[in-house]
Image (cartoon, rainbow, N blue to C red):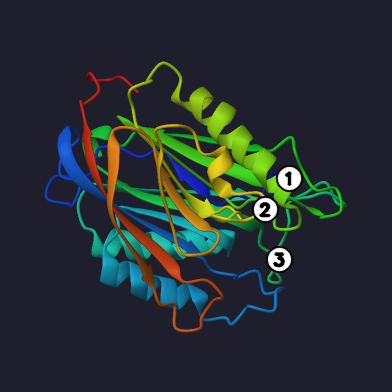
Amino acid sequence: MLTAVCLLVVAGLPAGSSGAGAAGAGTLRVLQMNLCNSGRAGCYTGRAVPQAADVIAAELPDVVTLNEICRDDVVTLGRTLRAVRAGGTTVSAFQAAGDRPSGGPTRCNNGEPYGIGLLARLDARDARPSVHRGTYPAQDLADPEERVWLCVRAGGLHACTTHLANTSGQVALAQCGQLLGTVVPGVRGDAVGAPTVLAGDLNLRVGGMPDVRSCVPVGYRRIDDGGRQQILASSGVTICCRRSVDMRGATDHPALLATMIRSWPAPPPGRY
């Protein structure tokens, strides 16, 4: 399957949080991190997950998207989010990148599956999310790692994450187009008014060849870390602020934090 950063479908944050309630205006804090924690890459330090936990505790995000992680990293950081954001329900999901030669998952040096993950804090009343995942049809056949996407759908907001190809800009662009043009509308289904939030390392940048803006649909808002990490939001969400967060040398990417203002109607009871 495909290595993914994450686009998230998230909704209904607990009352008293930055995204108070499942309806009306509120704020949503989205934190994107590429932790380089496979143990195989030169950027591996062994300190990325503890540093990520410290950042989560300090920044109190509602949604966390994770790239280049091992499966148990999602469990560890999910416990952190649950501890610092009491109330509601914390939902976690992981998707392994595929390994073309073996036909199985790509693995970290410790033997765990390697890939992407997401964490979301939901209102207990809306904690019935569905998880969607898949592998991109466009892949760089020279790269044994197959890139993937991961989405969560709950209440009135959709979110996904993905880590796009780093060996070919054209392949990354095709994957971006597939995610935003086909995957997201498919996950959203008939909930056409529900906003979508996407966060991840897209391996595409503004002014690059190709330019990340060429795969961003009309009406989407977008911010970046000055490099390849991007956070996008569809209509119904305004990105009011962005900030890079120092990871203190624990990984080769800063964290990217966005505060979003949400304003959309609550879905009818039981509708997702």
Q: Of circles 1 and 3, which is in front?
A: 1
- Above or below — where is 107 with respect to 210? below
Query: Which sits earlier in the primary sequence, circle 1 or circle 2?
Result: 1
Q: Give the residue at x 61% y 35%.
A: 177
- The residue that mark 2 highlights is 209
User: Which label is found at residue 248?
Assistant: none
- Could you tell me if residue 255 is visible in this image? yes
| C-alpha gap between disc 2 and disc 3 | 36 Å
Residue 216: give x, y in percent of width and height. Answer: 51, 39
Amino acid type at circle 1 is Val
125 sits to left or right of 108: left
Relative to the observer, which residue lies in front, 272 or 75? 272
Residue at the farthest top position: 190
User: Which label is found at residue 171?
Assistant: 1
Q: Of circles 2 and 3, which is in front?
A: 2
- The residue that mark 3 highlights is 111
Residue 99: give x, y in percent of width and height. Answer: 78, 52
Element carrying mark 1: helix
Query: Which sits earlier in the primary sequence, circle 2 or circle 3?
Result: 3
| C-alpha gap between disc 1 and disc 3 | 28 Å
Q: Give the residue at x 58% y 40%.
A: 214
Q: Give the residue at x 59% y 82%.
A: 45
Amino acid type at circle 3 is Gly
Residue 95: give x, y in percent of width and height. Answer: 59, 48
Relative to the observer, which residue lies in front, 61 or 90? 61
- Above or below — where is 25 with respect to 53? above
Q: Quadrant of residue 205?
A: bottom right
Query: Which sits earlier in the primary sequence, circle 1 or circle 3?
Result: 3
Q: Of circles 1 and 2, which is in front?
A: 2
